[in-house]
Image (cartoon, rainbow, N blue to C red):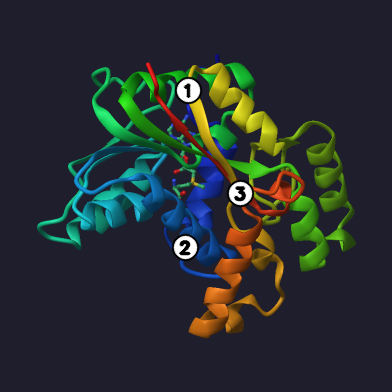
């Protein structure tokens, strides 16, 4: 097991990437809206939620504002600081806690959470044994009947992003995508904004890893559907009726096995039945 939660290139990437704003524009808006609707399907009010890899706290603060007791853990001290600032902006509905930590060693009591979010660590843990350990930690945290939301990046995300974004003019990008398609190991040796070290899952692989960690899969879902690829996404998202149509499109194909990998992200919803 790699003892360092975040390799240096991931730290450098997030220092420059502006993760706090990512979900507020472009395809991030689709990801946010759809992830929120998936979480709400399975999370009754007033629960204890652990957001592991919660980053700058967009989901954690939203859930705290809804009245949940939310604890955020992230490997990036910068993101934890940002989450604390965001939490401070919602007096009376702050995060219950926010601290630096590793998804593979949560250092919290067993069976203490109704829900665990793992929306990030699984794709930055590039080796399967590390991902199984992180999933096992999530399971240990969950009360019996508690629910896990675990996100992966689709094996085909960089292929579609490159096609629709005109990135294949750059031979370095072609090489990155070729490796992604071969073994899912995403590496970016360039200084371009082609994301950073990650593992891109085949959707069914993510579900298999969750099962291997002892959880029962309830749903395996494509998050964004086709909407994230639209060149005019920004203007269509700005129109409430059109936005609803884009979300409806994603919802319509969310469980279709042959289309799961079309989304940039897949989410497994799973339950701790022990
Ligand atoms: C793309 S961000 C996602 C943030 C947030 N969950 C979201 O969905 O918007 C990925 C986050 O996972 C965190 N992360 C990566 N590996 C981790 C690990 N082993 N333990 C805890 N956090 C980790 C990173 O620091 C980063 O904040």
* Residue placed most toward the observer, 132 or 268: 268
Q: Could you tell me which secondary element the residue under label 3 belongs to?
A: strand
Look at 23% across and 52% down and name the residue there. Answer: 64
| Quarter location, residue 175 | top right
Residue 158 visible here: yes
Residue hosting label 2: 33
Residue hosting label 3: 265
Look at 54% across and 19% down and name the residue there. Answer: 132
Q: Nearer the viewer, mark 1 or mark 3?
A: 1
Q: Earlier in the sequence, mark 3 or mark 2?
A: 2
Residue hosting label 1: 215
| Quarter location, residue 1 | top right
* 84 horizontally vs 117: left or right: left
Q: Earlier in the sequence, mark 1 or mark 3?
A: 1
What x and y, as percent, mark residue 180? 78, 40
What x and y, as percent, mark residue 21? 45, 63
Is ligand 1 closer than 8 angstroms to the Cβ of mark 2? Answer: no
* Residue placed most toward the observer, 98 or 41: 41
Look at 47% across and 63% down and name the residue there. Answer: 33
Image quarter (top left, top right, bottom left or bottom right) of the C terminus: top left
* 241 horizontally vs 271: left or right: right
> Looking at the image, do the residues carrying marks 2 and 1 touch, with CB atoms under 8 Å apart?
no
> Looking at the image, do the residues carrying marks 1 and 3 touch, with CB atoms under 8 Å apart?
no
* Residue placed most toward the observer, 93 or 98: 93
Spatial CA span between label 1 and label 3? 20 Å
What x and y, as percent, mark residue 49? 28, 39
Spatial CA span between label 3 and label 2? 13 Å
Vertical arrangement, residue 96 with respect to residue 247, above or below: above
Look at 67% across and 54% down and name the residue there. Answer: 263
* Residue placed most toward the observer, 9 or 37: 37
* 175 horizontally vs 17: left or right: right
């Amino acid at each position: 097991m790699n003892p360092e939660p975040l390799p240096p290139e991931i730290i450098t990437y997030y220092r420059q990437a502006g993760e706090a704003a990512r979900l507020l524009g472009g395809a991030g808006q689709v990801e946010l809206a759809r992830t929120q609707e998936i979480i709400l399907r399975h999370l009754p009010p007033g629960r204890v939620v652990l957001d592991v890899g919660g980053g700058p706290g967009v989901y954690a603060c939203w859930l705290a504002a809804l009245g949940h007791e939310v604890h955020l853990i992230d490997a990036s001290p910068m993101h934890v600081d940002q989450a604390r600032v965001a939490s401070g902006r919602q007096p009376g509905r702050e995060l219950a806690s926010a601290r630096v930590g590793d998804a593979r060693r949560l250092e919290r009591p067993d069976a203490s959470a109704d829900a665990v979010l793992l929306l990030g660590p699984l794709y930055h843990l590039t080796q399967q044994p590390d991902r199984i350990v992180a999933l096992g930690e999530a399971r240990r945290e969950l009360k019996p009947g508690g629910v896990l939301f675990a996100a992966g990046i689709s094996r085909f995300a960089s292929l579609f992003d490159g096609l629709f974004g005109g990135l294949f003019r750059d031979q370095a990008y072609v090489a990155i995508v070729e490796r992604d398609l071969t073994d899912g190991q995403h590496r970016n040796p360039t200084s371009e904004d082609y994301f950073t070290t990650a593992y891109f899952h085949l959707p069914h692989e993510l579900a298999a890893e969750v099962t291997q960690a002892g959880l029962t899969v309830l749903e395996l879902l494509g998050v964004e559907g086709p909407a994230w690829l639209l060149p005019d996404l920004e203007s269509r998202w700005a129109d409430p009726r059109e936005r609803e149509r884009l979300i409806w499109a994603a919802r319509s194909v969310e469980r279709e096995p042959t289309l799961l990998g079309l989304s940039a992200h897949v989410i497994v919803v799973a339950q701790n039945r022990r």
